[in-house]
Amino acid sequence: MKGFYHVPVAKNEPVKQYAPGSPERAELQEKLKTMRAEVRDIPMYIGGKEVRDGEKKSLHPPHDHQHLLGYYYKSEKQHVSQAIDAALAAKSAWANLSWEQRASIFLKAADLIAGPYRAELNAATMLGQSKNAFQAEIDSACEIIDFLRYNVQFMTQIYAMQPESSAGMWNRTEWRPLEGFVYALTPFNFTAIAGNLPTSCALMGNVVVWKPSNTQVYSAHVLMKIFQLAGVPDGVINLIYPSGPDAADVIFKHRDFAGIHFTGSTEVFQNIWQTIGNNIHLYKSYPRIVGETGGKDFVIAHRSADPQAVSVALSRGAFEYQGQKCSAASRAYVPSNIWETVKASMIADLKTMKMGPTEDFSNFINAVIDEKSFDKLAKYIDNAKADSNAEVIVGGNYDKSKGYFIEPTVILAKDPKYVTMCEELFGPVLTIYVYDETQFEETLELVDSTSIYALTGAILSNDRYAIELATKKLQNAAGNFYINDKPTGAVVGQQPFGGARGSGTNDKAGSMINLLRWVQPQTIKETFVSPVDYRYPFLG
């Protein structure tokens, strides 16, 4: 290195609106048409090579499950081993590459997504994960662009964190990558998160084995193509599609397993943690365990809140992304004095929400991700219809004949501990409990104690005393807390995302905190003039 380089200042990528007549709308619609007409043959990527081996599995849009998008190749245990070997073979060269070269690669990836590959990545998300154009723009293109640019900036800030030095010595810290490989296990719902999990580790000099959810393979393939075009060397990120048990059986028994970057269910994460603990004696070093898991995200309204603002926060917070967003509002506490107004407004809005395929830009609601999710949600809705402690006040219909469509559904719970107030559903189902407007502080206690999760939450109020009370009482109930807004929509560099309790390790994706988990610092002390006499002054 011949200089102390300053990377371009990170700024959030502007969100395109896709309004009728806009050039981005026309480009995206054309890309959707083209990609829908293709049948893509999606390989594994091991050591930079495309591997087409083993059982072919088909890919279908959740909103049109008879249509064929393409095929991918299910990985077996030998492919997992090959991916690990490829990663370890690439490790030395990648770890020793100058940091500015790694920075350049991922800044280029961001620019490729912002420019020529924006429409393709968004279209892949719309077709493969059933998100509408605006949802895909925010949580596919813009968020991964922001992850890449801000992480580069955070990396330089970490490297600049250096200790003080006394006279006659120089103290410095080397931020080394982990010793081994990192396993990135990514979710079905967010393309950007799936891209961030392997790249944040790789940026800090680590090598990665990446397993996306089967329902996210279609967009993961586009991301991998972009990473290769950006210059990620062969073997640094290896993309494979094994079953969870097959991957676990190989990865969590490997001596060089150095860490896992995970987003998914709490149950799976706890099983992974247990497996790692049982195998701890096998590893060269203690693995880093980083995970964002489930949520039972809340909205509590105070009696002073604007009923219309509460209604919109609930409708947007619960039903955008079909509620298949770990931050989606799924339980709400509304005071009795404004409930009837909130109820009427919500019902009126929900009746106007169109539901259908993502290719039709007039649809606000699209399909849930797969049949398993559909069946789970349908069962909860049916149970609520039959339960005297609950009432379905709007929605409650579903249909999987064409796609996995669940109508936005609001359940009114008579019991604040009713099952859908406590358990994560991960879909467009919101449960509301109406509390006595004079029992606000008691209801805060209820919010804090009802769920095992602590991911996101929101308070709506025009009373600052109530806002301060809620902020203090609920400080451990949400990793991301929103005042007078819906509990969703975290922006990289603005609201780093993550939660504690049953929601994960709260390592804040898209922040310096997360990147610190992927380095192993070494302190170096250099003494300029070495002592030549063992005697200290106190000896006389």
Image (cartoon, rainbow, N blue to C red):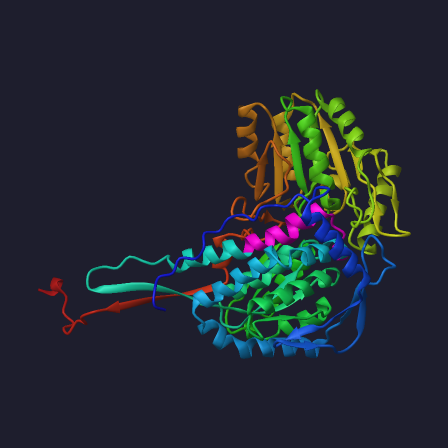
Total count of labels: 0
Specify the segment rendered in magenta: 128-147
Residue 414 visible (yes or no)? no
Q: Is residue 99 above or below residue 357?
A: below
Residue, x 49% and y 68% (percent of image)? 205
Q: Main secondary structure of the magenta part?
A: helix
Residue 41 point in image, percent of width and height: 76, 70
Residue 156 point in image, percent of width and height: 42, 58
Residue 352 point in image, percent of width and height: 81, 34
| Most foreground residue, 513 or 43 | 43
Q: Is residue 8 above or below residue 339?
A: below
Q: Is residue 55 left or right of residue 27?
A: right
Name the residue at the left extreme.
540
Q: Is residue 327 above or below residue 52?
A: above
| Most foreground residue, 390 or 100 | 100
Residue 524 point in image, percent of width and height: 32, 67
Q: Quadrant of the C terminus?
A: bottom left
Residue, x 69% and y 24% (percent of image)? 307
Q: Quadrant of the N terminus?
A: bottom left
Q: Is residue 142 above or below residue 90?
A: above
Q: Is residue 535 left or right of residue 483?
A: left
Residue, x 82% and y 49% (percent of image)? 357
